[in-house]
Image: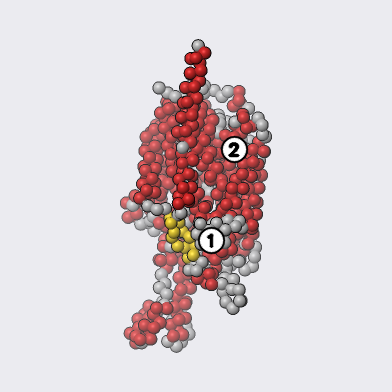
Amino acid sequence: MRLGNNASSRPGPEEKAREQWDHPLQFVFACISYAVGLGNVWRFPYLCQMYGGGSFLVPYLIMLIVEGMPLLYLELAVGQRMRQGSIGAWRTISPYLGGVGVASVVVSFFLGMYYNVVNTWGFWYLFHSFQDPLPWSVCPLNGNRTGYDEECEKASSTQYFWYRKTLNISPSIQESGAVQWEPALCLVLAWMMVYLCILRGPETTGKVAYITALVPYGVLIIYLVRGLTLHGATNGLLYMFTPKVEELANPRAWINAATQVFFSLGLGFGSLIALASYNEPSNNCQRHTIVVSLINSATSIFASVVTFSIYGFKATFNYEDCLNKVILLLTNSFDLEDGFLTASNLEQVKGYLASTYPSKYSEVFPLLENCSLESELDTAVQGTGLAFIVYTEAIKSMDVSQLWSVLYFFMLLLLGVGSMLGNMMGILTPLTDSEVISSHLPKEAISGLLCLVNCAIGLLFTMEAGSYWFDIFNDYAATLSLLLIVLVEAIAVCYVYGLRRFGAELEAMTGRALNWYWKVMWAFVSPLLIISLFLFYLADYILSGTLQYQAWDATQGQLVTKDYPAYALAIIGLLVASSTMCIPLVALGTFVMHQCTKGDGASKA
């Protein structure tokens, strides 16, 4: 028995009055701006580095075809057909499925709370990029002004600026500390910018999308030209494009490829459904699916070329700096002639000194650093570590470093804001679609209240322990929840609403028949893949034992591993449950209400 209603494929009068994009390109740019985000810049290069360089593209592109594009098309088609936000769209498919939309809104709300903190840090670094020298390029003096700060000397100037000056991080999550007023002001600025961009829904978001979608590519092209001219860039590019075919047999490479495709397209948040709901019913969303998917993937590869050219420069710079320190130490220790010892004859001279002066060499040997270009390139970093430590490490060594710093953090801001706009549309559209809310509050007030609440809660992430809470939200607020949401979406369209029915309505709406590829992917392949990912992450969480986090130890100048306290584990469980439980609870509530309605009708009869 089908639980879907008998809604006609023809739009009703309320749909005719619905806002629409001024031009189809606005929709495409809004989708690109939403999908192409920070993950393309700071996670995809990391995965390439971890799983075989160029060979990682094989599982990535396969997963794009069997998972990414089909599920993206599914969400865009649902939004365009139902012409409502996530809650209304899934309730139209079946009254028992309203919880899927609620779950999407909850996850999007969690994402908005912490994601805009990245834009906060982007503003912070952008403002400091105008200083000469860059504040993270040198260590500050200690209190006595007799040397450099001890914590900075043990770490590095870029790590010190990130952990001490930006985060003022506490030693553990238990020590919350106070709100840092400077990052707090940057957070308020970030939310004010988001509010101005979403003020009137598609009317303002569509225009801003041109900037947030296009300008980052201009910056990436400038960085590519600069990166390719840097000394050592070829070392990074060779490292990236040299395939390690053996990694294709590593199941984690395939799992991470599927996960990257899934999350980089922004599936499950309800944002794509919301964006598509403002389309003309006859819009060719199949073509737009392919365009957005390919541009998103091409951007990841393009950003990786830029990143690995920077990696190569940084690795070569560190390697040569290490060699120069070794050469200077040996030259001074053995009174060698200046210029005699070079990188080309270093190993040969070291062997000679070890055999000729064994006792003296044994004293010097513990002080000699082991310099290796390969180990420098093997150092894999992702997320904030890549954006705010590795990149800044490379930027400080460039000529006219202030210019490259401003360009880089301006690009990060645009990428972050673009993703935030799509995310906020995923929340705002269901709220403005609700007659109960929209009849009492204008759209500008709803947008303002949403931003205000998010900003107030987001102050948590500006405390001294804020980055630990950021990691909790980033790691656990969405992963399992989104997989479950998208799985239910695919099952709902194919087996509740009916794949044949949905295909017929799409054909009537767009004039294009749904071909076998989409049907097979929606009905069988993509759901099975999502189930596999869901089971993998569930097993990974269970088998990993006590959940741990990386805490900054100022005395050592490095990260140390600690166990999460009991209350943090409880919040992690609450984050996962608060969204996933929406699906069964709303279905149960709908069932109870229907039973009560039937009971009242029977008693009256």
When the figure is inspected, residue 35 is found, relative to residue 282, above or below; the finding is below
Where the N terminus falls, by quadrant?
Answer: top left
Expressed as whole percent of the image width and height from the top left, the position of residue 586 reads 49, 31
Q: How many marks?
A: 2
Expressed as whole percent of the image width and height from the top left, the position of residue 33 reads 56, 45
Q: CA distance from mark 2 to mark 1?
A: 35 Å
Labels 2 & 1 near each other (Cβ < 8 A): no
Per the rendering, the mark at residue 327 is: none
Camera-side residue: 181 or 174?
174
Q: Residue 124: which quarter of the image?
A: bottom right
Q: Residue at x 48, y 50 (%)?
A: 567
Task: Name the residue tied to disc 1.
Answer: 170
Single out the mark in the foreground, 2 or 1: 1
Camera-side residue: 595 or 443?
595
Per the rendering, the mark at residue 428 is: 2
Residue 88 in view of the camera: yes
Please tell me whether mark 1 sits on a helix, a strand or a loop: loop
Residue 508 in view of the camera: no
Among the two numbered marks 2 and 1 on one chain, the one whose residue lies closer to the N terminus: 1
Expressed as whole percent of the image width and height from the top left, the position of residue 528 reads 36, 38
The three-letter amino acid code for the residue at tag 1 is: Ser
Q: Residue at x 43, y 43 (%)?
A: 480
Q: Residue at x 58, y 55 (%)?
A: 462
Please tell me whether mark 2 sits on a helix, a strand or a loop: helix
The three-letter amino acid code for the residue at tag 2 is: Leu
Q: Residue at x 55, y 36 (%)?
A: 274
Camera-side residue: 140 or 215?
140
